[in-house]
Image: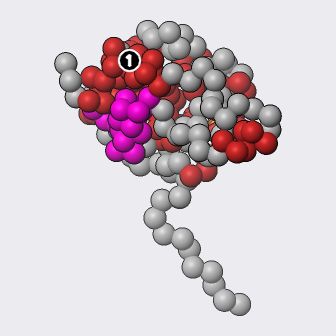
Amino acid sequence: MTEIDEPTGPPVTLIDAIDMSKLDSKFREEIKSMPNGEELSACFACSTCTAACPTANMWKYKPHQLIRMILLGMREEVLSSNEIWLCLTCYECQERCPQKVRVTDIFFDCKNLAAEEGKIPVNVLALAKELLTKGQLYTVTADWEREDMGLEPEVPGLSVEAVKTILKETRTKKLVGGEE
Ligand code: SF4
Ligand code: SF4
């Protein structure tokens, strides 16, 4: 009978060790004080949010782990994570949370905080700049398809100038364009 090699090292299910000296005890209250954070502390780590998420299997930190990291005060890790930007905002997690934790909206708050600190991924930054400049991300070119469906060739009511003005007058320009 051949012996099976014993696996070495920690189980793959363990996440990285937490550096307690880097925890920010105010982070939990910071998120809780925002309009979406009221139920944050009610999370009991059931992982339903992660089970519902269509993309979490690709993420290093799963939704329930990110919520736990917020509760623990892992501000730097959460706000620097790719995951908050990878969220599709499909709300599957939030809809299913038995504790009514506003998971998706909390990730929005995290993105806003990260953006304020200049932690915006380059691809998101590029899209935002495009939106600021052109007022839209995609131009409808297949007007013949619209006509085939009995629609007007041009999208009615589309005002790229209005979008550009709104973005310039709001914090988007400051955050994306680096202006005061
Ligand atoms: S579903 Fe809700 S209670 Fe369960 S881990 Fe996710 S946030 Fe926490
Ligand atoms: S909203 Fe984001 S975190 Fe929630 S299920 Fe959808 S992709 Fe996953």
Residue 142 x/y as whole percent: 64, 46
Q: Residue flagged by tag 1: what amino acid is it?
A: Thr
Q: Nearer the viewer, residue 8 or 38?
A: 38
Mark 1 neighbour density, 10 Å: few (under 14) some (14–19) many (20 or more): few
Q: In the figure, is residue 90 to the left or right of 112?
A: right
Q: What type of secondary structure mainly makes up the magenta span?
A: helix
Question: Which residue is rendered at x = 54% and y = 18% of the image?
Answer: 40
Q: Nearer the viewer, residue 56 or 127?
A: 127
Q: Is residue 122 magenta?
A: yes
Horizontal relation, residue 66 to residue 132: left or right: right
Q: Residue at x 61, y 50 (%)?
A: 57
In the drawing, does residue 40 fall left or right of residue 69? right
* Furthest residue toward bottom: 1
Q: Quadrant of residue 131?
A: top left
Q: Is residue 46 visible?
A: no
- Viewer-nearest residue: 115 or 149: 149
> Residue 176 appears at what percent x and percent y?
30, 30
**With respect to residue 113, does 34 lie above or below?**
above
Asked if the stretch drawn in magenta spans residue 76, the answer is no
Of all residues shown, which one is farthest toward the left?
180
Q: Position of residue 126 (x, y in %)?
A: 36, 41
The quadrant of the image that shows the N terminus is: bottom right
The x, y position of residue 157, in whole percent, is 60, 20
The residues colored magenta run 118-135
Q: Which residue is mark 1?
A: 165
Q: Residue at 57% x, 79% y: name it.
A: 5
Protein image colouring? secondary structure
Quadrant in which the C terminus is drawn: top left
Image vertical order of residue 160 relative to residue 11, above or below: above
